[in-house]
Image: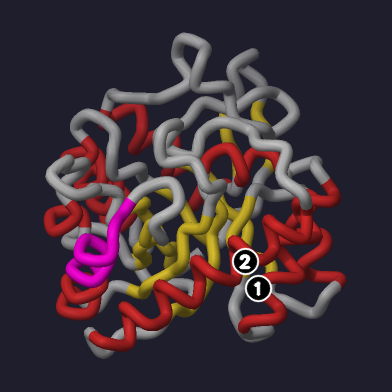
Amino acid sequence: MAYMDLNSDVGESFGRWTLGDDTAMFRSVSSANVACGFHAGDPTVIRRTCREAVAAGVTIGAHVGYRDLAGFGRRFMDVDPNELADDVVYQIGALQALAATEGGRVRYVKPHGGLYNAIVSHTAQARAVVDAVKSVDPALPILGLPGSEVLRLAEAAGLRAVSEAFADRAYNADGTLVSRSLPGAVLHDPDEVAEHVLRMAADSAIRTTDGSILKIDADSICVHGDSPGAVAMAGAVKAALTGAGISIRAFA
């Protein structure tokens, strides 16, 4: 593979509360999953994040999630599919407006946290997300876990389904992410993460928690912006990829 997209969750500060160093992350990544105000972010933070992404030449994506500020959107919520679809439309629309004020444009959608994990197998919620994205702009790709229900339904609906892998997360043998409630779910060693990413990009494979190698075809790799040492980790990932002759380029 000659190139790989690196994406990161950004714009997750809120009011006087600051999370991550988005400006520094933009030096390493090619795509920005911008929080849309439901799990994190407020209008001022979102607009500033879009401004910085545009200045850095980083592609803007809508990081939509459950309406769950208190839980940072990481809890599953049993939301009526119609309500969920409306929430997703609302979030995309808000980001489109704020991005436009800074000369940017929303080019893809990536669900966040609890919603992301739910729509790996939850058909009703996955369909709600797909229907919402298609109703706003059928040209918007959806970023999700390989083999997930949301990507299957996206393809069936004529949307572009983009498979994603995670640089700093451990994987179960079935290709799902290890729950954050379990030890070792988040990887912190930059060298370990770099090795993890090179295996994904060069060999289309990941090493799972039981030691087995799982084939995975990813068009984008996520480096979380809220992890400790996230900036150094993103830099290490970029350096490892470029050192292996793989350039960093947005998929959208």
The residue nearer to you, when weighing 205 against 146, is 146
Name the residue beneath numbered marker 1.
133
Q: What amino acid is at disc 2?
A: Ile
Q: Residue 75 at what x, y percent from top left?
A: 56, 31
Give whichever of discs 2 and 1 has the lower sequence position: 1
Q: Which segment is the magenta one?
A: 41-49
Q: What amino acid is at disc 1?
A: Val
74 to the left or right of 88:
left
Q: CA distance from mark 2 to mark 1?
A: 8 Å
Magenta region includes residue 140? no
> Residue 36 lies in what quarter of the image?
bottom left
The residue nearer to you, when weighing 73 against 116, is 73
Write the residue at 61% across / 45% down. 116
Name the residue beneath numbered marker 2.
142
Write the residue at 29% across / 33% down. 227
Against 87, residue 212 (above or below) is above
Which mark is nearer the camera, 2 or 1?
1
Q: SS class of the residue under badge 1?
A: helix
| Residue 6 in view here | no
Against 111, residue 62 (above or below) is below
Which residue sits furthest top? 183
64 to the left or right of 229:
right
> Residue 79 lies in what quarter of the image?
top right
- Is disc 2 in contact with disc 1, using a CB cutoff of under 8 Å? yes
Q: Residue 82 at what x, y percent from top left?
A: 77, 60
For the residue carrying disc 2, how many other residues have a C-alpha within 10 Å: few (<14), some (14-19), or many (20+)? many
> Residue 198 lies in what quarter of the image?
top left
